[in-house]
């Protein structure tokens, strides 16, 4: 098995004509590999049916149900997987990943698709402060609408649109991958939701097994991806929009950057109620108006992608572009002549460097003139802007350069330069600040990993809470308490045990798993002040991985103990300017090396104590200028340019 996934086939495994080369993705329903087609001498992508909830890999590489009780579900899901492959094989569209073939082996099923070196929208958006530019959003929107229109025209739905399922080829063309029809069908059979939807991008009808789905379902998910591309974060999860809807329209929050008709169309696509959304792609496209070109006129836009990202599944392979001026019939020059032409620039460069060194004073005087005797004043150093809630940082101005004056006689006894000790001190400050910034950056990856795990856990918790609130919950009872509190859910020995929802007299609402009369497991809470938490619980306390949010004010993602952020994670203010802090937290306060981002450009990397900048670090202002400094209790007390 590979190190990346204990259920994946080892690299080098031969599947008929295909040799597995790398693992490129996995989820609760399948594993995707890069493979080499030994007959056609090309790379392809192969997706394996591997539902981890009720199947396992045997030592001989075959896939089998975990037990006899899962045998029917496993076989039924395998047939739906093959049905999906057959349906996708009918499509040949520039914005839909081509399916080449499908087959059965190792007790399971496989789909073979084209492979191309591209990057998912999720990868692009994971870059710090990355949001797509208007032209990039136009290109992404046009491609997704065009692909979905073709899919819907065949009576087929995608059902799992999210940033990781949209690949942007290197020429900027977006490709839809990983259709979820079989996964959704399995959810309807097994009544398991955790592996068949992604909460941030799934509409409310996907939470109900009998919810009516149609093109409006894919429209919601597509709009959620576009919201993430524009705002830098996805919209609120559908289950959190029941009752008081925290969604803030893009037409209000981002009207300064994007066309109004585009933002309004995306807001309509994100309507909570299915009947309030556009019902077809053509109807939705009309709402975009002139903000989108016609499909046949849409120019290809190249999106900036992370250089270090690994290859991902995409559309049809394209040969590398040839230079426009190349003449393929031209006879190449002889190798000796090429070497001769290449040698002359080097010789001239060396001679020029020698002349520049020898005649440097004359050249400087000729170009810039004779230096004038005048007094120069140094520019004051920039002052960092503190985030909201902090005292604005003050800085010590950089020392002014000495005025230029006429040459003075050399004293009999040479004196050491007065700025020597000051220069040494500034160098030491810069070195310590750079070291602290490096330690802070090392924490970012761990904090982001904890935040991703927390978001996934919060999604699972919201799904559990949605089940707990279903009116048809089995063995449900109603209990009442003093002060107007009540509980509706499963009960054992007179205590809350199983799934259920508690309503307190002050308006607090708890929903999820209960054990021994307390929340234990996964669940959500909405407090009287509208603060919300979704994630893990222990003995009635929000403890474990999760997400806490007060709509429009603050959001925290990571590990919690007793309702407070404890361990690696991130905090984000939701008011402008957005402030994001990443690192290790203690009792909700960043403590130790960490990173603070203010808006889209300002950034501090360094030490924190009790939630304030404290110690050495580096600050980058809105103009991209970076300076070293030392902070105490949130204030800059020493700096160097």
Image (tube, rainbow, N blue to C red):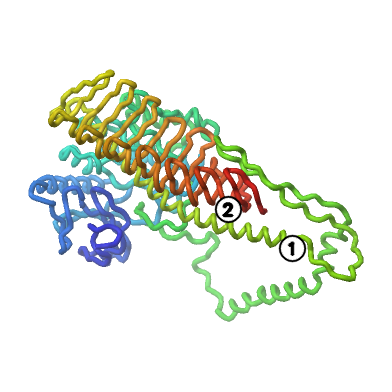
Can residue 3 be seen in this snapshot? yes
Please rate how many residues cluster around mark 2, counting C-alpha atoms within 10 Å: few if below 14, some from 14 to 19, many from 20. Answer: many
For mark 2, what is the residue? Answer: 616
**Which residue is drawn at the image coordinates 38% and 50% (left, top)?**
449
- Dot 1 and dot 2 residues touching (CB under 8 Å): no
In the picture shown, does residue 511 fall above or below 637? above
CA distance separating discs 1 and 2: 22 Å
Please rate how many residues cluster around mark 1, counting C-alpha atoms within 10 Å: few if below 14, some from 14 to 19, many from 20. Answer: few
**Which residue is drawn at the image coordinates 41% and 29% (left, top)?**
247
Give the residue furthest to the right. 409
**Which residue is drawn at the image coordinates 26% and 21% (left, top)?**
485
Q: Quadrant of residue 112?
A: bottom left
Q: Counting residues from the N terminus, which is met first, the one under dot 1 or under dot 2?
A: 1
Give the residue furthest to the front. 482
For mark 1, what is the residue? Answer: 420
Label total for image: 2
Q: Quadrant of residue 542?
A: top left
Q: Secondary structure at mark 2?
A: strand
Image coordinates for residue 606, horizontal then vertical, percent: 54, 51
Q: Quadrant of residue 316?
A: bottom left
Can residue 100 be seen in this snapshot? no
Q: Nearer the viewer, residue 421 or 555?
A: 421
Looking at the figure, which quarter contains the N terminus?
Answer: bottom left
Q: Secondary structure at mark 1?
A: helix
Image coordinates for residue 64, horizontal then vertical, percent: 13, 54
Image coordinates for residue 284, horizontal then vertical, percent: 38, 30
């Amino acid at each position: 098995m590979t190190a990346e996934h204990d259920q994946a086939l080892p690299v080098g495994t031969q599947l008929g004509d295909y040799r597995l080369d790398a693992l490129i993705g996995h989820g609760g329903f399948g594993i995707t590999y890069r493979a080499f087609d030994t007959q056609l001498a090309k790379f392809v992508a192969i997706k394996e049916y591997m539902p981890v909830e009720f199947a396992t890999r045997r030592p001989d590489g075959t896939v089998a149900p975990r037990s006899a009780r899962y045998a029917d579900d496993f076989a039924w899901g395998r047939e739906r997987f093959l049905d999906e492959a057959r349906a996708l094989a009918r499509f040949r569209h520039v914005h839909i990943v081509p399916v080449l073939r499908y087959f059965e082996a190792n007790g399971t099923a496989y789909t073979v698709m084209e492979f191309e070196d591209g990057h998912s929208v999720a990868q692009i958006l994971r870059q710090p402060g990355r949001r797509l530019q208007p032209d990039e959003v136009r290109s992404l929107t046009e491609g997704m609408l065009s692909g979905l229109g073709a899919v819907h025209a065949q009576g087929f739905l995608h059902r799992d649109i999210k940033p990781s399922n949209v690949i942007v080829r290197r020429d900027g063309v977006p490709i839809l991958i990983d259709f979820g029809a079989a996964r959704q069908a399995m959810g309807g059979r097994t009544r398991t939701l955790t592996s068949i939807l992604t909460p941030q991008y799934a509409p409310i009808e996907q939470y109900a097994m009998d919810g009516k789905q149609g093109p409006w379902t894919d429209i919601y998910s597509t709009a959620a991806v576009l919201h993430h591309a524009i705002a830098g974060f996805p919209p609120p999860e559908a289950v959190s929009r029941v009752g008081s809807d925290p969604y803030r329209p893009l037409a209000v929050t981002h009207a300064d950057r994007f066309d109004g008709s585009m933002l309004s169309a995306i807001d309509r696509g994100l309507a909570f109620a299915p009947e309030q959304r556009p019902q077809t792609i053509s109807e939705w496209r009309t709402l975009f108006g002139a903000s989108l070109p016609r499909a046949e006129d849409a120019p290809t836009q190249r999106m900036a992608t992370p250089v270090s990202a690994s290859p991902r599944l995409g559309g049809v392979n394209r040969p590398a572009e040839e230079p426009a001026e190349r003449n393929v019939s031209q006879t190449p020059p002889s190798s000796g002549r090429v070497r001769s032409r290449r040698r002359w620039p080097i010789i001239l460069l060396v001679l020029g460097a020698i002349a520049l060194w020898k005649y440097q004073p004359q050249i400087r005087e000729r170009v810039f003139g004779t230096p004038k005797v005048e007094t120069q004043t140094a520019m004051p150093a920039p002052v960092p802007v503190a985030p909201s809630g902090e005292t604005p940082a003050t800085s010590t101005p950089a020392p002014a350069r000495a005025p230029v004056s006429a040459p003075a006689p050399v004293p009999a006894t040479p004196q050491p330069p007065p700025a020597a000790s000051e220069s040494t001190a500034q160098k030491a400050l810069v070195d310590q600040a750079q070291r602290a910034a490096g330690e802070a950056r090392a924490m970012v990856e761990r904090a982001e990993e904890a935040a991703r795990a927390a978001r996934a856990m919060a999604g699972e918790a919201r799904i559990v809470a949605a089940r707990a609130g279903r009116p048809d919950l089995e063995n449900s009872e109603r209990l009442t308490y003093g002060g107007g509190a009540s509980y509706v859910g499963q009960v054992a020995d007179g205590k809350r045990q199983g799934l259920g929802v508690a309503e307190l007299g002050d308006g607090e609402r708890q929903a999820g798993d209960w054990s021994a009369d307390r929340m234990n497991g996964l669940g959500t809470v909405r407090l009287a002040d509208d603060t919300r938490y979704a994630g893990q619980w222990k003995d009635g306390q929000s403890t474990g991985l999760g997400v806490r949010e007060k709509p429009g004010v603050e959001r925290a993602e990571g590990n919690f103990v007793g309702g407070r952020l404890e361990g690696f994670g991130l905090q984000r203010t939701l008011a402008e300017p957005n402030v994001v802090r990443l690192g290790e937290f203690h009792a909700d306060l960043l403590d130790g090396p960490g990173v603070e981002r203010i808006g889209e450009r300002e950034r501090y990397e360094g030490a924190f104590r009790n939630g304030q900048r404290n110690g050495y670090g580096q600050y980058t202002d809105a103009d991209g200028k970076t300076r070293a400094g030392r902070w105490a209790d949130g204030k800059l007390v020493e700096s160097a340019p």
